[in-house]
């Protein structure tokens, strides 16, 4: 007779389950580190293609490189691209950028700033992803980390090249994660440093303090709010006017409150509405269920009050500081709201956010990686290199935006749109002026600087270089 024990057969192997992956041996820190490393790699590929193809988005990279160069040589940031003797601390208040000095000292090149920015943004990816994994599990957390790394605000910042907000993004990530983990002292310290990145972030610190006060039920948050407001007032009313050549805060006129009151409908300009909707969309609407989202209001306020359309949309670096806020808010909502307390629902939301980020990437910077030949053409590289070779080291040179970031490391560079002292060399991009005389750069320089004589030393269909005799 066959017994029950004899008839028992081994159970068939079951397919891997979600829970098995969630409890795999890979630690949350290791997983988030992998996501951050991959983000850094992708960002760096993009920056390298930009740099190698001589794609310069604005004069800001040159400006911040001159600042880093001065700090690395233990000098105040006197940036000639902004004007003769211009102290950049009178433009925006960003003393924390002194941290660029050791990096530039080791690698004195404008490209170094792009690497530093990519590193800082990738650090914020690790912080946000690590927190998401701890709160929501490995699969959902990784999905959220990837979505954050590919978010349109981060992509736009990378595309716009280096700006001071590169330091603000990880500081915000550290601060908000500490706040959500109720590590109040750490949250206070990380947030307090934001006032040294850019003056308007003092108002962001003010709102972070209010959120902290509400959640911690202590006065520490109110002190943080007072710190933020105090520094905003001090920098905009005292420090910046004292250092600015115009004896005022250079950007005060852009806060056009009167214009908004006279035309309230301007608040609903399509670009402004789209920016707000995209902030909500990249978190699948989850950010609306956390009070942390209130922290975006100061940044959106100064941008939408401005009359400059460049501030309203999704381009440039202005939205990067909003990304840690809305993603931490989304994680907060997923981990605290009872209606969302389901592993499957959380996985669905995390996957949705990741897919949204991937789809939106086709419309932003990283989408250009799909066709590098089109977006990073190299047919002008030889011309650019020849024009740069015509300018020797250690001279003064007046130029436009085209090649300034490649000159600032080894020359003293002035922007052609300012009132400058007569330079030793002039380099201009003439590609948009067909039929121009090969001596146009020299002739125009002589007109700008009466009594001088310039001789053309290099000219082709794209650049002209003239030397003062």
Image (cartoon, rainbow, N blue to C red):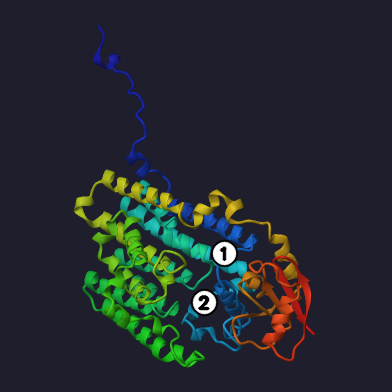
Q: CA distance from mark 2 to mark 1?
A: 15 Å
Quadrant location, the C terminus: bottom right
- Residue corresponding to mark 2: 97
Judged from this view, the residue extending furthest toward the front is 435
Q: Position of residue 290 (x, y in %)?
A: 25, 62
Q: Residue at label 1?
A: 115
User: Where is residue 319 drawn, in percent x and y?
Assistant: 41, 66
**Does residue 315 appear left or right of residue 377 in this picture?**
left
Residue 108 in percent (x, y) is at 65, 72
Residue farthest to the left?
Answer: 338
Coordinates of residue 156 in the picture (x, y in percent): 47, 62
User: In front here: 330 or 459?
Assistant: 459
Rendered position, 270 above or below 416 = above
Q: Residue furthest top?
A: 1
Query: On the picture, is 257 further left or further right than 77?
Result: left
CA neighbours of label 1 inside 10 A, class few (<14), some (14 to 19), many (20+): some
Q: Nearer the viewer, residue 273 or 448?
A: 448
Residue under the image location 62 percent in, 62 percent down: 51
Ranked by sequence position, the earlier of labels 2 and 1 is 2
Res 17 quadrant in image:
top left
Which residue: 44% across, 55% down?
Answer: 150
Quadrant occupied by the N terminus: top left
């Amino acid at each position: 007779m066959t017994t029950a024990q004899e008839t028992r057969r081994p159970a068939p192997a079951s397919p891997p389950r979600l829970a098995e992956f969630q409890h795999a041996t890979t630690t949350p820190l290791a997983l988030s580190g992998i996501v951050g490393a991959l983000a850094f790699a992708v960002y760096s590929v993009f920056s390298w293609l930009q740099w190698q193809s001589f794609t310069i988005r604005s004069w800001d990279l040159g400006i911040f490189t001159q600042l880093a160069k001065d700090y690395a040589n233990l000098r105040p940031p006197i940036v000639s691209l902004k004007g003769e003797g211009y102290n950049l601390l009178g433009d925006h208040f960003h003393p924390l950028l002194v941290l660029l000095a050791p990096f530039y000292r080791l690698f004195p090149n404008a490209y170094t700033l792009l690497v530093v920015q990519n590193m800082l943004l990738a650090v914020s990816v690790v912080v946000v992803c690590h927190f998401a994994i701890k709160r929501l599990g490995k699969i959902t957390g990784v999905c959220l980390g990837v979505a954050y790394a590919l978010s349109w605000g981060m992509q736009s910042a990378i595309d716009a090249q280096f700006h001071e907000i590169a330091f603000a993004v990880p500081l915000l990530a550290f601060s908000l994660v500490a706040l959500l983990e109720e590590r109040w002292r750490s949250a206070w310290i990380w947030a307090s440093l934001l006032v040294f990145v850019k003056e308007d972030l003092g108002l962001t610190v003010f709102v972070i303090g209010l959120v902290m006060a509400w959640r911690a039920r202590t006065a520490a948050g109110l002190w943080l709010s007072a710190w933020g407001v105090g520094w905003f007032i001090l920098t905009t009313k005292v420090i910046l006017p004292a250092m600015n050549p115009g004896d005022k805060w250079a950007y005060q006129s852009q806060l056009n409150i009167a214009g908004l009151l006279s035309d309230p409908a301007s608040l609903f300009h399509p670009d402004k509405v789209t920016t707000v909707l995209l902030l909500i969309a990249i978190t699948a609407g989850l950010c609306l269920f956390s009070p942390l989202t209130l922290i975006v209001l100061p940044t959106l306020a100064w941008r939408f009050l401005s009359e400059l359309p460049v501030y309203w949309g999704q381009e440039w670096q202005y939205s990067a500081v909003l990304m840690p806020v809305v993603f931490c808010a989304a994680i907060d909502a997923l981990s605290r709201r009872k209606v969302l307390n389901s592993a499957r629902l959380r996985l669905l939301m995390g996957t949705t956010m990741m897919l949204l980020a991937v789809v939106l990437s086709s419309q932003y910077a990283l989408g250009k990686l799909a066709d590098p030949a089109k977006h990073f053409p190299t047919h002008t590289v030889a011309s650019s290199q020849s024009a740069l070779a015509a300018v020797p080291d250690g001279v003064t040179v007046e130029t436009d935006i085209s090649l300034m970031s490649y000159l600032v490391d080894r020359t003293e560079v002035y922007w052609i749109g300012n009132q400058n002292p007569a330079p030793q060399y002039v380099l201009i991009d003439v590609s948009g002026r067909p039929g121009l005389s090969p001596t146009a750069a020299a002739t125009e320089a002589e007109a700008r600087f009466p009594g001088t004589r310039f001789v053309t030393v290099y000219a082709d269909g794209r650049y002209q270089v003239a030397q003062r005799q």
